[in-house]
């Protein structure tokens, strides 16, 4: 009987401790929006060790309380079309709630070099695609553009360009228009 009472007491004590958990930061009373779950309601968010530990309609206690009434609390936004990959641009993006900025339109001529230069020097997550423009310039005018390390061995033209009457391409740094079309 004593073991049963002790077990109930410990269970009640641990339940009280769970309810009274202290978080590092509490975002209090913000409109929580989560596209994945469809959540859209005023909630309190408890953050511990840099991670969301609890989302609740009940009050939460924390070492730091951020009053978020009238504000939206959402996961970090991803910008798929970010040209500015420097620190001032990243700072503005972070203030706008962007946590990942990707350069997916023009891309980088050398993805490995892009990643190397960004590692440890970025305020937010980053990424890029391989530059189609640089790859085309490398094929048409290889003397104008240093070949990225990732393209030196793998890039082979699919066939020689053939002359046409249209003037649709200006290649690399060629001084004249070079009318070309793929066969």
Image (cartoon, rainbow, N blue to C red):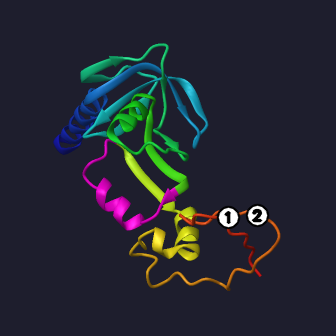
Position above or below: 97 against 118:
above
Q: Is residue 21 visible?
A: no
* Snapshot quadrant of residue 24: top left
Tags 2 and 1 touching, CB below 8 Å: yes
- Is residue 118 inside the magenta stretch? yes
Q: Position of residue 87 (x, y in %)?
A: 32, 39
Badge 2: residue crowd in 10 Å (few <14, some 14–19, many ≥20): few
Position above or below: 24 against 146:
above
Q: Is residue 11 visible?
A: yes
The alpha-carbon separation of the residues under discs 2 and 1 comes to 7 Å
- Report whether 60 appears left or right of 84: left
Task: Tell me the SS state at disc 1.
Answer: loop
Position above or below: 144 against 163:
above
- Report whether 120 appears left or right of 66: left
Task: Tell me the SS state at disc 2.
Answer: loop
In this figure, which residue is indicated by the disc labeled 1? 177
- Is residue 176 inside the magenta stretch? no
Q: Residue drawn 69% across and 64% down?
A: 169
Q: Position of residue 59 (x, y in %)?
A: 37, 19
In the image, which residues are magenta?
107-123
Q: Residue furthest right?
A: 165
In this figure, which residue is indicated by the disc labeled 2? 167
Badge 1: residue crowd in 10 Å (few <14, some 14–19, many ≥20): few
């Amino acid at each position: 009987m004593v073991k049963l009472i002790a077990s109930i007491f410990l269970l009640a004590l641990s339940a009280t401790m769970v309810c009274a958990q202290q978080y590092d930061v509490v975002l209090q009373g913000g409109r929580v929006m989560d596209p994945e779950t469809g959540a859209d309601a005023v909630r309190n968010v408890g953050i511990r060790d840099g991670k969301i530990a609890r989302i609740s309609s009940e009050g939460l206690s924390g070492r730091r309380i951020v009053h978020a009434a009238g504000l939206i609390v959402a996961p970090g936004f991803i910008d798929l079309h970010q040209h500015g990959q420097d620190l001032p641009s990243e700072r503005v993006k972070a203030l706008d709630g962007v946590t990942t900025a990707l350069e997916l339109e023009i891309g980088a001529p050398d993805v490995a070099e892009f990643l190397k230069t960004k590692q440890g020097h970025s305020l937010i997550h980053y990424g890029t695609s391989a530059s189609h423009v640089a790859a085309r310039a490398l094929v048409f005018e290889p003397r104008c553009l240093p070949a990225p390390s990732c393209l030196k061995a793998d890039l082979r033209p699919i066939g020689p360009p053939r002359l046409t009457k249209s003037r649709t391409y200006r290649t690399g740094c060629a001084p004249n228009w070079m009318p070309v079309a793929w066969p």
